[in-house]
Image (tube, rainbow, N blue to C red):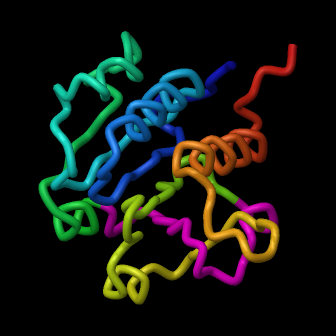
């Protein structure tokens, strides 16, 4: 993968993640694909949890992860940036959306998504189309799918 500018890259934001194995897998995806990770606390687990460390292995790079103490702090920091909410409740598909390289892709808590208050404040809400009668993909899979599309659209994948 080649990066034109290390300051311009997608960001994955997790709202109060509650499954350590999923967060660790997302860390690995972000590390391998060159995205930053932002975690809105509180988490439903400790970062030093054994299950978390086993999946994250040596991919955890403190410089690629930014923690926010609350959703308020996160949205204040993002006031001049585009945040895109990934949700099964959206009507628009991620594959018909034009991503910008510096977008922040927000994923809700595995057990409950994000509160309605956040749904109402975010303009861009996208979904991953799925087979009828299926509830949702694993969040780590969803992150990989949407991040790959952002990188593809912004020509960040080295095809050589």
* Residue that protrudes farthest toward the front in the picture: 133
| On screen, residue 130 above or below 38 | below
Q: Position of residue 15 (x, y in %)?
A: 33, 59
Q: Is residue 54 left or right of residue 105?
A: left
- In the image, what residue occupies the spot 62% across and 56% down? 137
Q: Is residue 79 left or right of residue 8?
A: left
- In the image, what residue occupies the spot 19% across and 54% down? 41
* Residue that protrudes farthest toward the right in the picture: 160
Quadrant for the N terminus in the image: top right
Q: Quadrant of residue 117?
A: bottom left
Residue nearest the observer in this picture, 13 or 83: 13
Q: Quadrant of residue 132?
A: bottom right
State the extent of the magenta-drawn residues as a range. Answer: 78-98
Q: Position of residue 128 (x, y in %)?
A: 71, 64
| On screen, residue 135 above or below 36 | below
Q: Quadrant of residue 112?
A: bottom left
Q: Is residue 11 left or right of residue 68?
A: right
User: Within the magenta stretch, is there residue 84?
Assistant: yes
Q: How many marks?
A: 0
Q: Is residue 86 left or right of residue 118?
A: right
User: Within the magenta stretch, is there residue 156?
Assistant: no
Quadrant for the C terminus in the image: top right
- In the image, what residue occupies the spot 45% across and 79% down? 122
Q: Position of residue 105 (x, y in %)?
A: 50, 56
- In the image, what residue occupies the spot 29% across and 48% down? 39
Q: Position of residue 18 (x, y in %)?
A: 30, 52
* Residue that protrudes farthest toward the left in the picture: 69
């Amino acid at each position: 993968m080649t990066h034109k500018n290390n300051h311009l890259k997608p960001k994955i934001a997790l709202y109060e993640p509650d499954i350590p194995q999923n967060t660790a897998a997302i860390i690995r995806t972000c590390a391998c694909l060159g995205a930053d990770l932002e975690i809105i606390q509180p988490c439903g687990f400790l970062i030093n949890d054994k299950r978390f460390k086993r999946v994250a292995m040596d991919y955890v790079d403190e410089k690629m992860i930014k923690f926010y103490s609350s959703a308020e702090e996160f949205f204040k920091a993002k006031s001049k940036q585009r945040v895109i909410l990934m949700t099964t409740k959206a009507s628009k598909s991620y594959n018909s959306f034009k991503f910008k390289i510096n977008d922040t892709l927000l994923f809700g808590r595995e057990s409950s998504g994000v509160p309605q208050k956040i749904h109402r404040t975010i303009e861009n809400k996208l979904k991953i189309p799925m087979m009828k009668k299926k509830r949702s993909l694993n969040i780590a899979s969803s992150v990989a799918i949407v991040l790959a599309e952002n990188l593809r659209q912004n020509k960040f994948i080295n095809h050589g």
